[in-house]
Amino acid sequence: MVQQDADNFEFAEYLYNEFVENHRKHGKDARLYWYVLGSYIKLGLSKENQTEERQYAQKLSNIIGEAVRDWNTHLLLLKGEHGEQEYKQRMEQFIKRLWALGHDEQSIIELIIKKLKLNYGNDN
């Protein structure tokens, strides 16, 4: 059960992760989770003391939106605890796949940067 903390991002991360996992399996049908995330931002995070949660959830929604618009949903990584484990595995696989496709070191660095910017933004 999710606690009522001011800095509780678990439900937003859950919806984001469900979008990513379901998009990998089912494609566009996963957009339901993006819609629910948007509704959660508007209705579930409408209180003044939930500003930080709302901003984080909006950032996750924006990441999905950018990935959908640019056809880059395959680059999305899971967030939270699930994401930490997956990050290492997916990044290693991504780099190996790029080498196998014949990319040089510079293009691999550029593609890694693109993937990281999509998932984490420039504000870090």
Image (tube, rainbow, N blue to C red):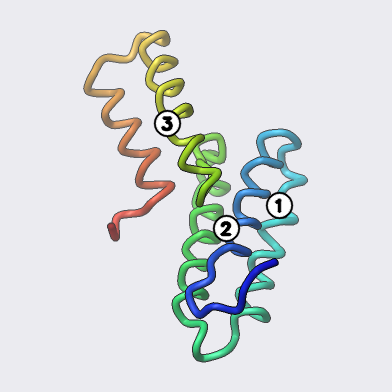
Q: Which residue is mark 2?
A: 13
Secondary structure at numbered mark 1: helix
- Residue 31 disc label: 1
Secondary structure at numbered mark 3: helix
What's the residue at 48%, 74% (across, down)?
7
The answer to whether 82 appears left or right of 44 in the picture is: left
- How far apart are the alpha carbons under marks 3 and 1? 26 Å
Looking at the picture, does residue 106 appear above or below residue 45? above
Q: Measured from the top left, where is residue 16 in percent x and y?
A: 60, 54
Looking at the picture, does residue 115 appear above or below residue 92? below
- How far apart are the alpha carbons under marks 3 and 2? 18 Å
Tell me if mark 3 has few (under 14), some (14-19) or many (20+) residues whose alpha carbon lies within 10 angstroms of its own: few
Tell me if mark 1 has few (under 14), some (14-19) or many (20+) residues whose alpha carbon lies within 10 angstroms of its own: some
Q: Nearer the viewer, mark 3 or mark 1?
A: 3
Secondary structure at numbered mark 2: helix
Which quadrant, please, contains the C terminus?
A: bottom left
Q: Nearer the viewer, mark 2 or mark 1?
A: 2
Q: Measured from the top left, where is residue 82 in percent x and y?
A: 55, 44
Disc nearer the start of the sequence (2/1): 2
Instruction: Say which amino acid is labelled 1.
Output: Arg
- How far apart are the alpha carbons under marks 2 and 1? 15 Å
Is 1 or 41 nearer to us in this picture?
A: 1
The answer to whether 74 appears left or right of 23 in the picture is: left
Disc nearer the start of the sequence (3/1): 1
Q: Measured from the top left, where is residue 41 in percent x and y?
A: 60, 74
Q: Which residue is mark 3?
A: 88
Instruction: Say which amino acid is labelled 2.
Output: Glu
Asked if disc 2 and disc 1 are in contact, CB closer than 8 Å, the reply is no
What's the residue at 72%, 33% (across, down)?
25
- Which of the 4 image quarters holds residue 73? top right
- Residue 123 disc label: none
- Which of the 4 image quarters holds residue 47? bottom right
